[in-house]
Image (tube, grey):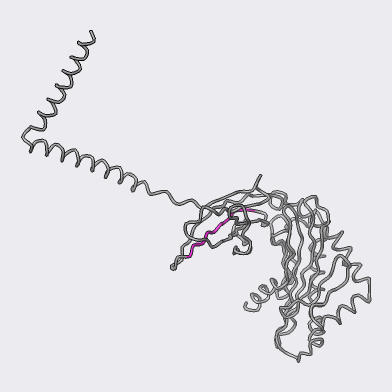
Amino acid sequence: MGLLVRSLLLLGTLALPGTWAGSHSLRYFFTSVTRPGLGEPRFLAVGYVDDQQFVHFDSDSESPRAEPRAAWIEGVGRKELGYWERQTGILREAAQVFGAGLETLRGYFNQSAGGVHTLQRMYGCEVTPELRFRHGFYQYAYDGRDYLALDTETYTWTAAVPPAVNTKRKWEADRSWTERDKVYLEEECVMWVKKYLEMDKETLQRADPPSARVTRHAAPHGEVTLRCRAQDFYPKEISLTWLREGQEQLQDMESIETRLGGDGTFQKWAAVGVTPGQEGEYTCRVQHEGLPEPLTLQWEPPSPPIGLIVGGIVAGLLLIAIIAGIGVWRKKNSGGKGGDYVQAAVNDSAQRSNVSLTAKT
């Protein structure tokens, strides 16, 4: 079990090319791991359309076969006669080729017999929203480090380490290798992307907009961080950008890679450090294929609880009642003089008004 987990983690060694909003991709990951004293290397393969795994192969299975990993691909054999048999044959052959490749690379790196070594390959293509070829990729890694990559502009191989020059020379000496790769990436791979997308339009071609919000986090020493979090979106391509008074804060921004949300959607956050009291100067811009236009969000201080508001009103009314009570108490304790004085003043004012009116008539 530990070997399987380690092998799957190594799949992340090869850097994935960036994708564009609305684009689609087909990717395969192969990993072969030696295990001294336990027989042939273990070979694992997985395939993805966009971000959804659809096929899996494990040479340690009781009967190693290409197996479906998505509901929409399970019935492909009815539409593509011999599909699963062909996939199984390709992957079983790849397992043998990778086993031999591990032996060859051990010699290139002057490594003695024994020890655990890994050989990985990631390849596939990306297409435009109109389903036309955008670019392809073919990369190899050995023992967790980049080894060789295909430059799809010139269709030549780039060696990442000195021992890889041996492989580069061998493959470039026989142009038929590169020609086959070119045909696969630019034609066959694109054809399969179209077919797979057609098989599951509702899932693979949907665009679920993100729900997003901004939260404020204060550290013990006074530092303040604003975090913009987006979730429940598909596909995974999304842009979260912090702006201060309209200016992008790329250098001061921290973010995580887009992650699976556990229900087929994705989530991501981006944070920025701010000076306390200046939170209102910052906005988060969220861009995604599922949004008709970008979202612009700000942190909003939480409203006081309703209980606190009601309590304030009650306290205010109580204060008014107390003041009124004090006034009544003072009046009573003045023996009524204050009241007589007020009444006399009112009567006197009324009399002056009457006199004035009489004088005018």
| Rendered position, 285 above or below 163 | above
Q: Give the residue displayed 85% in from the left and 81% down from the top.
A: 165
* The magenta segment: 223-233
Q: Along the line of sight, which residue is nearer the eye, 336 or 124?
A: 336
> Can residue 274 be found in the magenta stretch?
no
Which of 301/43 is in front?
301
Above or below 6: residue 20: above
Residue situated in front as seen by the camera: 324 or 317: 324
Give the percent coordinates (x, y) of residue 41. Answer: 74, 81
Q: Is residue 232 magenta?
A: yes
Residue at coordinates 65% horizontally, 56% vertically from top-left?
239
**Magenta span: chief secondary structure:** strand
Residue 171 vertical placement versus 210 (above, below): below
Res 9 → quadrant? bottom right
Q: Residue furthest top?
A: 361
Q: Quadrant of residue 261?
A: bottom right
Quarter holding the N terminus? bottom right
Q: Residue furthest front?
A: 359
Q: Position of residue 164 (x, y in %)?
A: 82, 80
Residue in the image at 79% along x and 73% along y: 92
- Whether residue 264 is visible to the viewer of this picture, yes or no, is no
In this image, 248 relative to 74: left or right?
A: left
| The C terminus: image quadrant | top left
Q: Position of residue 158 (x, y in %)?
A: 83, 74
